[in-house]
Amino acid sequence: MINILGQVAEGQIWQPTLTELSYFAPELVLVATLLLLLIGPLIAGRGSGATLVMVVVGMVAAVVANLLVMNQVVTGPVSGLAPAAGHMLLVDNFSIFFKFFLLLFLLGVTVLWMVGSAATERNAPEFYILLLGSMLGMSLMVSTMNLLLMVMAIELASLPSYALVAFDKRNRPGAEAAIKYVIFGGTCAAIMMYGVSLLFGVFGTLDFTRIAPQLVEIFENLAQVPASKLALLGLALLAMGAGIAFKISAVPFHFWCPDVFQGAKIEVTTWLSVASKAAGLCLLLRLLQVLAGSAHASGHGFSAAFYLQVVTGVVAVVAAVTCLLGNLAAYRQQSVKRLLAYSSIAHAGYMLMLGAIVLTGDVTQLVWQTVVIYLVMYLLMNLGAFGATALVIGQTGSDQLENFTGLGRRAPALAAGLAICLFSLVGIPPLGGFIAKWWLLWALGQAAMQQMHWWLWALLLWASFNTLLSLFYYLRVIRQMYLVNDDRPGLKVPAGGVVLINVCALLLLLSGTLLVNPIRQKVGRYTDHIFGQSPASIVQVNQPQNISGNQLDGRSRERIDTQ
Amino acid sequence: MFTAIGLTHYLLLAAMLFCIGLWVMASKRNAIGVLIGVELILNASNINLLAFARYSTGGMNGHLIALFVIVLAAAEAAIAIAIVVNLYKNFMSVDVDKAATMKN
Amino acid sequence: MNFKYYIWVILLVSSAVLLCGGQTALAQESAAAAAIVPASGPLEVIFFWVLAIMIIGSALWIALTGSVVRMAVGLFFSFGGVALLFFLLQAYFLGVVQLIVYVGGILVLVVFGIMLTSSSPHVRYQVPRMELATTGLVSLLLFMVLGHVLYHAPWSTTGPQLPVSMNELGRGLLTDYLVPFELAGVVLLVVMVGAAYLARQEKR
């Protein structure tokens, strides 16, 4: 590989070039928006309107920046800004996709906030500073291969989220949810940090692209590796997994999810339900992808390495249990927020199944297509469902199921949109949710056919069985809306909210019918280059050329050379 | 074992601190007590990092990572204490068990 | 379900997993030497043991005491001991940072938290003996397995390395670790806004 220690004249220091900086324009714009929100209120006042203007300006700028970066990066990831410690920050099509995803979702949440609580909110700047902070953390979670930056990004995503859950200060459930969230999150983060410190001791680096080949090598020569080292590695990886599983809310780290979702403001719940889980999942998938790439590069591939199958097995079991538990627990719920929380746990389980097959290597393209499609559909479905719940809460003051009684008569447009989103969450045929689930099952089936593993077929059956299970609790809500009737008065729901929900529903409807083919082609083209030229290995193409390496000590110089 | 100090000594010390931290988190009812347990665990990982830097691979990197862990610990403590104070304002108690209004 | 049990379940599961790992390790090797670097002077040895007793002793005190104020005092000695340990590890800058941030910052924050949230400083949160004993036992089990694995793992010891100078650290922060360095700024900013918002008295 290239030695990136260029010559720099004595007395000069290394700086990233403008081109390198421009790759991180979306992040920089987000930080600038944060600062604008801090300083702006001094001039424009603390009103919701002024804040909204600033946020929208920032978001538009971020979208434009992301578009510009997308046009630049077509060949591979870039790791500027961090010369020697490589892979601190990556820019590839996947991270760009995820930034678009987050921005789109933030737009949805903003509309929801505008309709629901903008009028009464007196602390709009703080709300958006925290929201944007967590968004920056989430986008960084998906743009890094360095475990240190991963921990920091997870913390940046979590810490503002804790505060957001307690944002409504007089709300007792909110305070309670926040303390549970912060205790649970802090515990998981600390355990993860301990695991990462052990990994650092074993490998001497936290760059996962350099850890992964060594891991694969260890896995392939099990006989020569002392058992204590294996135990140590298993322990460290498990501890690290705890932190990631917390973000995904996978079993057994899901306990915070229902309480936090119920206690938090509905906008915050909506935000956490999609963005936080998607970021955790994409982070995990990226790590597994690098592992798969290293196994592939070593020539043995998946089947030779028994321990890779163990890793896969663990992910598969966690996914299966997460699915089942989410679906079963959703039955008893009377609070719709809580019901949707369990539904989101179940959906995290479905998506986690992709983590089980990404290591098999043969179906990589299909897996990433599924990731992109599933995430987008999941965003639309959840935005619609939570949005409708927000409107009902706004009008009736509570999210109990009984408040949805006769909604089909009291607010027909709202009920229709919500019904479509719920049907889509089940995966009923002509809707977007069906397309997503179809892709998932297809990917599982393909992996099963190529690997001939019985447990992959079992996973496929399990996913279908769980889909069937989930049908009934979503139907409970729909039944309450259309079949149960009493003489409650009609609801006057704000038009903006109804439009948002019906746009989501319409998009779901379209993506399940007319747009199937365009989506397939577009996503197929996009995922061909999702990690640059070759998805199996992450390569660095843009090397920063001038680093003051002559000042670095011998140890790190050696480290750089081995790249 | 008692007359020469090496990497293992520090690692075992850190492991002990880690386990005591877990014990504190598992047994305390008080939200601040749980937070103290988290801080102990973060200290344990810092001892690990610096011991590796001194006796094994890593060198400067271990020091820098430990520095960032300290930053994160401070940030987390700040937000956690704020949330605890907020809990106290609402429930007049920092007992985690008492704040349990939400049920399945 | 009681919230406390959540952490409990995790503890149990992880220790069970660890136990399995520890067993295999025990079966395969028993004579792997601990990684001990011979060249450590007598003072270093004495200081290590004194500090170890100080850190673990005060941590145990934190676990056993029911009074939050005593917990904070225990935390003071624990943090201070870790800072001195860093000096022993020749991480001078980190030792100073540990003193300033942990002892001078986080500890003060914790004490403020205690003062703001208790009606009297002598309020006690006594944990039932039984619960304390069982959680302690599980932690002990965890430590035995973890310690076993750490003790036998083949660490690559290259011997004591030269201490890292502050110059190097500063250069590292602005080159290799520039991204985390900048990110730390954003984390602190966002956290500051969040904490200030939560702790602020609302105007009516």
Image (tube, coloured by chain):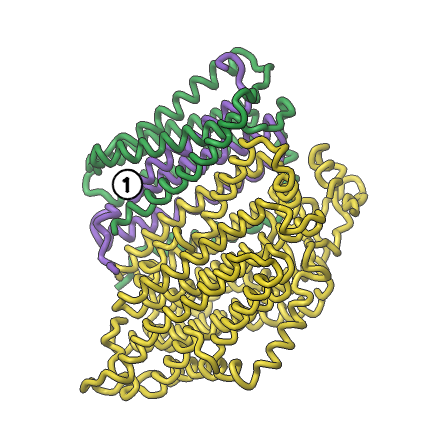
Which quadrant would residue A158 be assigned to in this image?
bottom left
* Residue that mark 1 sits on: C114
Q: Position of residue A193 (x, y in %)?
A: 49, 42
> Looking at the picture, which amino acid does disc 1 mark?
Ile
Which residue shows up at 74% across the image and 45% down it?
Answer: A547
Which quadrant would residue A468 be assigned to in this image?
bottom left
Relative to B80, say whether A524 is above or below: below
Between A390 and C200, the one nearer to me in the picture:
A390
Q: Which chain is yellow?
A: A
- Chain C drawn colour: green
Which residue shows up at 52% across the image and 11% down it?
Answer: C42
- Chain B drawn colour: purple
Between A427 and C164, the one nearer to me in the picture:
A427
On screen, residue A26 versus residue A41, left or right, reads right
Q: Is residue C124 visible?
A: yes
Q: Is residue A142 visible?
A: no
